Image: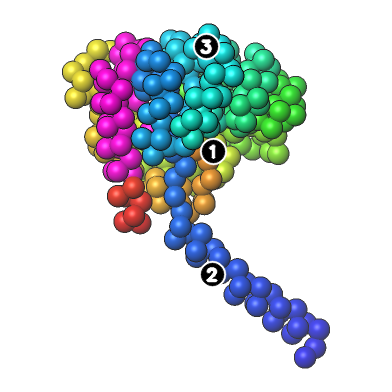
Amino acid sequence: MNRRTFFQCSAAAAASLALPRLQAAALTFKLNYLLGSAMYGNLPLATVIEETPKTGAQFLDVWPRRHGTQREQMDEIGHEKVVELLAKHGVKLAVSTRYDLGPLKLQDEMAIVKKFGGSVIVTGGVGPVGLAGSELKKAVQEFVEKLKPHLAKAGECGITIAIENHGKNLIDSPDSLRWLAEFGKDLPLGIELAPYHLEQETTLIAGLIKDLGNRIKVFCAWQHGHGCMKPMPKEEELLQMPGRGTLDFTPILAALKAVHYTGFTEIFMHPTPRGIPILPTAGEVTTEINCARKYLEDRLAAI
């Protein structure tokens, strides 16, 4: 066997050995559920932690006012007590959502998230809005440059800053997300992808997931439904939840599976007014989240 043939055979053998592992990974793909404390409004943090495993989640995302009060409760009852509550119920505080602080004032929060062993802080992308084309690209690049000192600190803490594609923000469109990923390169800069804020087209959302891959750190299982900006009957408000509205999550889940998505999946919606539970009691909230989770799992099983 000559040298060229040897290397060709070796490469083929390596590929054949890797194939079963890739196939197995595809077959065993599952979502890592993250519970957003804002779903429970201003209910006690202890209650939210107790409910977390009941929703199929091991990981908790803590929200502050005006969407929840759990982040403030952490400081009020003491972090040591929070550690005890988390350990009691087998829950890990993995994410802190801090739109209130913005991306340039997260240093103190980084230290706290690190102390709890968390890995992500979610916030918004500040900057000019309504841009497109080269102007948008330049603005996203400038935003990343401004973030670099803060990303350096985040890297030291083992934390990723994840920017949500939030409406009326610099980072709110598919193009802005792609450029954020491009300019972020190897920096600890991620994305929280919220379909609610995108056109409700499964092809667009699935394609965006394939473009961004595991730059996505939190996927919000959240659709637009009838929106969340004005009071409406509860049944209409709940159309934001997976399985309730008209958005078919099957192609979206297929895209997550195709990129071997390893980030968190947070079943989510906003109530009106903000700061109340999505349903009156903790048990009802948990049941509603589990209905959405069953929908997602059923769709995922069919892929």
Q: Amino acid at mark 3?
A: Ile
User: Is residue 27 rendered to the left or right of residue 161?
Assistant: left
Q: Mark 3 sits on what residue?
A: 77
| Residue 283 pos. (x, y %) | 28, 26
Q: CA distance from mark 1 to mark 3?
A: 32 Å
Against 246, residue 42 (above or below) is: above
Q: CA distance from mark 2 to mark 1?
A: 26 Å
Along the line of sight, the residue nearer the viewer: 3 or 83 = 83
User: Is residue 217 rendered to the left or right of residue 52?
Assistant: right
Check residue 245 in the rendering and tell me which mark sits there, or answer none: none
Q: Is residue 20 visible?
A: yes
Q: Are marks 1 and 3 in contact (CB under 8 Å)?
A: no
The residue located at (53%, 21%) in the rendering is 82
Q: Are marks 2 and 3 in contact (CB under 8 Å)?
A: no
Q: Mark 2 sits on what residue?
A: 20
Against 75, residue 225 (above or below) is: below
Can you name the residue that lies furthest to the bottom here?
Answer: 1
Mark 2 vs mark 3, foreground winner is: 3
Mark 3 Cα within 10 Å, few/some/many (few <14, many 20+)? few
Can you name the residue that lies furthest to the right here?
Answer: 3
